[in-house]
Amino acid sequence: MRLSGKTNSPCTYLVIVVLLFTVLPVLHRLVDWRVGYSDQSMISTLPLLALLPAAAIVLYTGRIGRLPKPLLVCLWLWFGGFAFALGVGALAGNAVASVYSFVQFILPALFAIWLATSGIPPETLYARLANFLLWLSVPLALYAALQFVAIPPWDAQWMHDAGMTFIGIPEPYQLRPFSTTNGPPQFADFLVAVIVLNLPRLRRPTPILVVQLALCVGTLALTMVRADWITLAVGVLCYIALSPQRLRNFTLIAVIAGVGAVLIVNASSLLGSSAAGAALQSRFSTFNDLGNDYSVNERQSYFGDTLNEALEQPIGQGLGVTGSAARLSQGGADRPYDDGYIARFVEMGFFGMACYLGTVLLGIGIAFKRWIVFTRAGANEDASVVAALVSMQLMLLVLDASIDHHTNFTGLLFWLTLFWAYTWRTAKAVPADLPAAA
């Protein structure tokens, strides 16, 4: 059936936004390679700027006020917590950095509201996004393999200029590939999202679908981001537990994992060097000696001095004092916290942190409640999709233990999966509807 222009326009907008978040970074590196490196280029703000038109429409037309009460509660908690932390940051003299951090968390929510109220069935948007992400993952995975084997000069120069020492050195088989994104963690997040959002399509598996998902699994191993390895396992187990036909889904996922494992085990042969297999083996072996692992010990240290520092400031230090936003107010200094919850607590204090956690947990609860509705109604196909949406939200909750995952692209995924879970329609169980576009 031919889709109308009304359907194509929001879908195209969504595709453009996804491309800006996932592919624009490599274009930025190409520009830097030719004209010189800049860590505060306007190019890096384009993904957020692309969300502004949708956000303006939502605010101008007052669509927020017409949302169902459960979603309104989530949004007001979210906006209230971040608005409070924005005020604290501005009063502390970090106005520019605070605003930049604020829009990173708020614009994805407003864009998701615009999509949800555009009058397009969530089934259409979900199917389009899942399919697009899956096909996009293929060239991104191949580019990551190229980086690992023979890193392009623009990527090597960026690693040097940006001081990306934690991902290795720009030499063959001595780095953790990041494809077109800004780093291995961001690329791993993308791959995990692709895998989980496409799990419901295994109800009607095809050879190309199995190969694509296996390629994502194999490439995820190549990123060597353990947080996403663990999180994917959590998401897959959650999906199997919630989805109908558990045994069938478990078997199909096991097949995909098996194909991915074959790719990982034969990495040396496929990538042309024994160094490839040695790097993966070394990373996997760290699970047996976590007590001596640097990054694990670094995270544990946050529960000492850093946590005490946050507890001593009940209203928080305000937005813009951690992460990339801090560069705008601290002379280029970046205070990275390898724990998203600690970073939120430092910036938002008791009130803001309560609003933050309340939104995230309430979002998972709303999606899970929708899954119960479909399960009791016997709508197995719909329950399978909502199971994937619940799994996606649970994974973002787990990933926040590494860095913030409710901002920018992953923040957009949180709000989209929440809205889609609440508005998913079926003949057997009709959820509450969101208002159509004004």
Image (tube, rainbow, N blue to C red):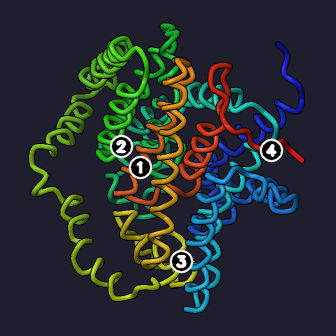
- Report, in whole angstroms, how far the alpha carbon at label 4 lies from the one at label 3: 34 Å
The residue that label 2 is drawn on is 228
- Report, in whole angstroms, how far the alpha carbon at label 3 lies from the one at label 1: 21 Å
**Can residue 211 be seen?**
yes
> Which residue is at a point 73% across and 43% down the rendered structure image?
116
> Residue 333 placed where, x, y %?
46, 79
> Which residue is at a point 69% across and 48% down the rendered structure image?
112
- Report, in whole angstroms, how far the alpha carbon at label 4 lies from the one at label 1: 36 Å
Nearer the observer, 345 or 298: 345
- Report, in whole angstroms, how far the alpha carbon at label 4 lies from the one at label 2: 36 Å
Q: What element carries label 4?
A: loop
- Check the image and report above or below for 51 versus 122: below
Label 1 with label 2: CB-CB less than 8 Å: yes
Label 4 with label 2: CB-CB less than 8 Å: no
> Residue 348 placed where, x, y %?
48, 76
The residue that label 4 is drawn on is 435
Looking at the image, is mark 4 or mark 2 earlier in the sequence?
A: 2
Looking at the image, is mark 3 or mark 2 earlier in the sequence?
A: 2
Looking at the image, is mark 3 or mark 1 earlier in the sequence?
A: 1
The residue that label 1 is drawn on is 185
Quadrant occupied by the N terminus? top right
- Residue type (three-letter) at the residue carrying disc 3: Gly
Image quadrant of residue 147?
Answer: top left
**Can residue 154 be seen?**
no
The residue that label 3 is drawn on is 320
Q: Residue 337 carries which label?
A: none
> Residue 5 placed where, x, y %?
89, 29
Tag in front: 3 or 1? 3
Looking at the image, is mark 1 or mark 2 earlier in the sequence?
A: 1
